[in-house]
Amino acid sequence: MDRYPPIADHGLVGDLQTTALISSQGVVDWFAAPRFDSPSIFAALLDHDRGGYFRIAPEHPEAATKQLYYPDTAILVTRFMSPDGVGEVVDFMAPDRTGTPTDRHTLLRGVRAVRGTVRFSLECRPRFDYGRADHTLELRPDGAVFRAPGMTGHLQCSFPVGRDGQDVQGEVTLNAGETAAAAFTVCAPDGEPPAPLTIAAVEDQLVAVGEYWQAWLRSSSYRGRWPNMVARSAITLKLLTYHPTGAPIAAATMGLPEQVGGERNWDYRYTWVRDGSLSVRALLDLGFVEEATRFTRWLGARLHERADLPGERLQIMYRVDGDPDIPEEILQHFEGYRGSAPVRAGNAAMDQLQLDIYGEALYALSEARQVGEQLDYQGWKGLATALDWLADTWDRPDEGIWETRGGRKDFTYSRVMCWTAFDRGIAAATEFSRPGDTTRWTAARDAILEQVMTRGWSEQEQALVQHYDGDVLDASLLLVPRVGFLAAKSHGWLSTLDAMDRKLVSDSLVYRYDPAASPDGLRGSEGTFSLCTFLYVDAMARAGRTLQARYAFEKMHTYANHVGLFAEEIGPSGEQLGNFPQAFTHLSLIMAASTLDKALDLEQRR
C-alpha cells in the first residue's frame, strides 16, 4: 500500500449524498459522512498515519492491478492479477431514491476470485472527525462496531476478523468462483444496526444499483462522437450532486494540492453558484431536464431569501442545503498529501466579493427557460430586486472568478458576467411580461459594454485582458462568446483567442493566468486548468477552428485517468493535481463535446 498514491489513481463511488474514493490498490482512502461536506472517516489521502483507511486486497507481492467501471454505472471494479490467481473487489453504494437527508450510508465491497486461488486481507481503520475523535471497538460475530462521539460505524464481513488495537484485520482465501463480502455502514449513535450481511443480498443490491445507473443514463439525449467520455462525465456530475436539494458540489475532496508540497490546498465540497449555474447548460445538453431544473429552483431560493435584506444578493458558495456559513479551519494535525500543508476544512472564500456570480445565475435561469422552467412570482421578485441592486453596484473591484487572495481588482470577466446578468434579465422580463426596470437595466448593460471595450482591451496584446490595470491574459474570458458578449467570429474575439494561444496555451492545455505576471497572494505555481482547456475547445469550435478544436479535445482525453475521471489541473509531467474528481472539469467537457459536435455536423452538411 502506497503512503500517497497519485491523485488520479482512484475511482469514485457514491449514493448521491456522499462519496468515497477507492485507489487501484483496493484502499478506501477518502470517505466523509453523512454528507459530502461532513468530517472525514477515512482520509489517508491527507494523512496516511492519522487519516484512516479501509483496505481489501490480495497479499501477493507481485499482484498487478487494473480498475474499471461496470459499463454505464458507478460500480467500480478493482482487479488484482498475480501468478496464483486473479481476484476482484467490487465497490458501490446504493443511490438515494427518496430525496430525504439521512445519517445512514453504506459502502458495499464484494470480493471474488476469478481464476486460481487468491488470499485477500482486510484492514479497517476508521478515524472519525478528521482523525480528531477517538473511538472504541466492539467485536461481533459478523464484524465489528466502532463507536465515536456522534457517530457509529458498523463493519460487517462474511469472513472472520480480529482486533488490532481499536481497529480490525482479517483475511479470506478464495478459489475460482468463490465470493465474500464486506460492508461499512455509518449512522447515528442510537441508530438501528444494519440488517445482517449476506452474499446473496449484496449481489441483489449490485444488480439493482447497476440497473439504476444504466436506466438513468439511457435517458440521455447525447448521440455525438464521444459517448463514453460524455457518459462518464454525466455519471460523475450526478454522483457529485446532493439529491435532497439538487445542489452540485465542486469536487468530492478537500485539501488535495494544486502543487505538491505547496499551500494551494482548498476544500471544494460545497456548491458554488458559478459551477452549479454552468452545470445547468451541460445537463440540458444531455437532456437531463429534471437535474437542471432542480438546481435552478435551489438557486431561485437563494435569491429569494436575500430579496428583502441589505447587502449582497448572493454568496459565491453555500453548503448543499443552502446554509451560507462555511468557516475555514486549518487541520494542523494532518501532514497533507505528500506534505502539502496546510490542510483546510471549510472555505474562507465564502466571504469574497465575486460579481460574476450574478451573470452565471441569470445564465442558468435563462437556459432553464428553454425547457419551460420559470421562476414563480416570488422568485422573479427576488431576481428583479437583485438586478435593481446590481445596477447600482456592478462598478466595483472584486476578487474575481479564481478567488485570488491578492486584493480586489477591476476584473474584466466580472464585468462581462454583470453584462450577462442584465442581458438575460431584460430578455426574461420582455419574453414573459414580468415587472422590472428594464430601462435602468439596459442602461447598465450598455455602460458595461462600453467600459469593458475601453478599459478591458489591451492594445499591446490586441485582446481582452484579466483586469483594467495591466495586460495579463485570463482564460475565464473564453466564456465571452458563449454568453454572447462578443460574436464568436468577430475580429475582437479572434484576436483575443490568438493572444491566449500565444500566452496561456501549452500543447493544447490552458493555464488560468500567469501568477508571476499577476500575483494572486499565494506562493507557488499551478498546473494547467482542465476546465479552461475544455472552454478553449468550446471557443475554438464556435470560432470555426474545428480541426484545432477537435485535436485539442482528443488530446485532452489522454489526460483522463484510467476510468475517465479528471482532477482540477494537469501538472508539468501530465499528472493530475487538485481536488478530485472536479465537477467543473466534467461539465465543461460535456459543454465542449456538444459545441464541437454541432460545429462538425454543420461542416459535414456544408
Image (spheres, helix red, strand yellow):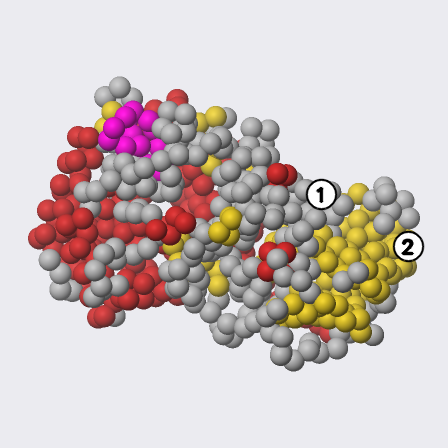
Q: Position of residue 243 (x, y in %)?
A: 48, 66
Q: Main secondary structure of the magenta part?
A: loop
Residue toward you, 174 or 192: 192
Q: Position of residue 117 (x, y in %)?
A: 91, 54
Among the 4 quarters of the image, the one containing residue 499: top left
Q: Position of residue 270 (x, y in %)?
A: 45, 56
Q: Residue at x 48, y 51 (%)?
A: 329
Q: Residue at x 51, y 48 (%)?
A: 330
How many numbered marks appear?
A: 2
Q: Is residue 76 left or right of residue 382?
A: right
Can you see residue 541?
Answer: no
Amino acid type, mark 1: Arg
Amino acid type, mark 2: Thr
Magenta range is: 463-478
- According to the picture, the residue beneath numbered tag 2 turns out to be 117
Question: Which of the marked residues, 1 or 2, is nearer the chain's N terminus?
Answer: 1
Dot label at residue 3:
1
